[in-house]
Amino acid sequence: MTDPKRPQTADDAWALVSRRELLTMLGAGAVAMGAGMPAWAQGAAKRGGTLRVSGTANPSSLDPATGGAGSDHTYLWTMYDTLVEWDYDTLKPKPGLAEWSYPNPNTMVLNIRPGITFHDGTPCDAQAVKFNLDRGRTHQRSNIKADLSSIAAVEVTGPLQVTVKLAKPDTALPAILSDRAGMMVSPKAAQEAGNEFDRKPVGAGPWKFVSWADNQKIVVARYDKYWRNDRGFVDGIEFSIIPELSTGLRSVSAGQNDMAYALPPRLKPVIERSKNLKLVTGPTLYCLQIYLNLAKKPLDNVKVRQAINFALDREAFVKAALSGIGEPAAMNMPSAHWAYDKSVASLYPHDPARARALLAEAGLKDGFELSIGGYTDQDSVRRGEILMDQLGKVGIRLKFTNGTVAEISAQYFGAEKKFDALLSAWTGRPDPSMTYGLMYSKDAYFNAGRVEVSPELSALLVESRASEDIETRRKIFAKIQRIVMEQAMVAPLAFTHEMTALSEKVKGYRTNLLGKPKYEFISLD
């Protein structure tokens, strides 16, 4: 489907970018994802068949408003279409269920495509969109209130038109509406099911919900009245929940499943040796990093945080922890992203002498012990061992407490604030303002210390949402990234590459910069 030209949307700003500029922004790796797709992944799409996928985790919820796990998305996208979509390679917003425009900086108008129905047969119209936006903003169980905080009011201004009144200009809203906040649920089904909607989802996506057996299987089936003909080719998808990734890979090799995603680099040789598997990789926003609680001593001292960053050998980390498959992270944006700033990338070369000097200036010439949370899976433990070695060389002694993702994350980000730091990942968001706002705003959940390091940063985050011009926004994010890294508010380590193993009968799968699989273009040979 060709996107219509709308001079007041973010699409037009992007359209001004030349092909050469686009290639520069994407980088060779991202361009290769689209232009260099292997021949076995191309060809005319066929309809029919059931795609069998090894899923990595049990969902937190199948209601997009109440769930909280980043791993939920790969299930949610099968059942829910979003008001706005994103380009796979760039995350540039583009029309989805609706087209958008900004008649003035404090108003967004959404024009909804006609003829769309939810899986229960009810219309996806202006009333339904208003219900969803209001539900996301106000429902007591909603986890997406912060995403929609710039909205002051939602008005139905036509059968297929919604006018969104903004408390302040927010040009990140299209990208926000390509995520959970833009996933449209059936108002009728949500109201009838109440809290049980978590397990009785009804959307307007290519597939409708069939069943969910906890920690075992999720099944979706084609919605025959889906509004598009250019995607949603398979008749159904069956997700087998297999948290152990090597076991999931073996299930594909044995023919029990057709696809396993989010695979660690250590399994790459296994995939390459297999005669019946194909490997697909691509850059992502998934950033392994050390979260730092800036309210804890001695991490409240910027020199200590800078010392941690100088002590890290990110090139060696990628080689040892990711088998060389990934990109050293100098900030929270990878080089493939349009908001990446090359000047910030040079702030922290590996310099143990500089790290020791900064610790001495902070009154810690003999080093210190840092309590840190980590996870129990094989790859997380290995990453922790590498960091213990690197930071130990400058006198920073890591004391790990390992547990499940849910346990350790809650102990670090929640009320307990149990650890000084956390070795984990940031899975990325469609717009950079979401990433920086959710991690570094004073009251952000992922800012464990709830510390405002820089009032300028807060002002720049607001400014980053005031313009639709991509070059203007790029310059603002360069300032934001420099503040974050000069203040060493985080210790980024590496961006992982998506690694997905497919059986030979799977055609048309494409990676995306979020690194979270979508299945809309897959067909089975």
Image (spheres, rainbow, N blue to C red):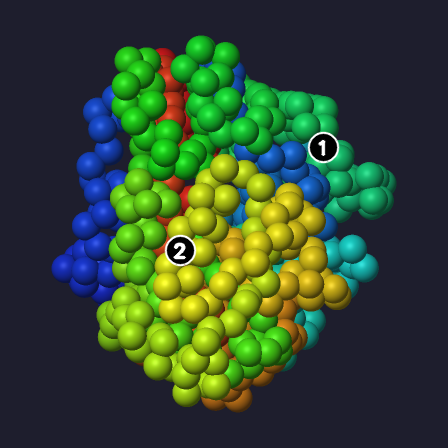
Q: Earlier in the sequence, mark 2 or mark 1?
A: 1
Task: Indicate the amino acid at tag 2.
Answer: Asp
> Which residue is located at x 26 percent, y 41 percent?
34
Point out the image quarter for the C terminus. Answer: top left
- 251 vs 37, left or right, is right
Residue 4, image x, y percentages:
37, 54
Pinpoint residue 9: horizontal percent, then vertical percent: 41, 66
In this picture, is 144 found above or below 383? Answer: below
Mark 2: secondary structure: helix
Report the residue marked by disc 1. 120
Secondary structure under tag 1 reads loop
Q: In which quadrant is the N terminus drawn? A: top left
In the image, is residue 472 above or below residue 493? below
Q: Tell which of 397 and 412 is nearer to you.
A: 397
Q: Which residue is mark 2?
A: 389
Amino acid, disc 1: Asp
Residue 335, visible in the rendered structure: yes
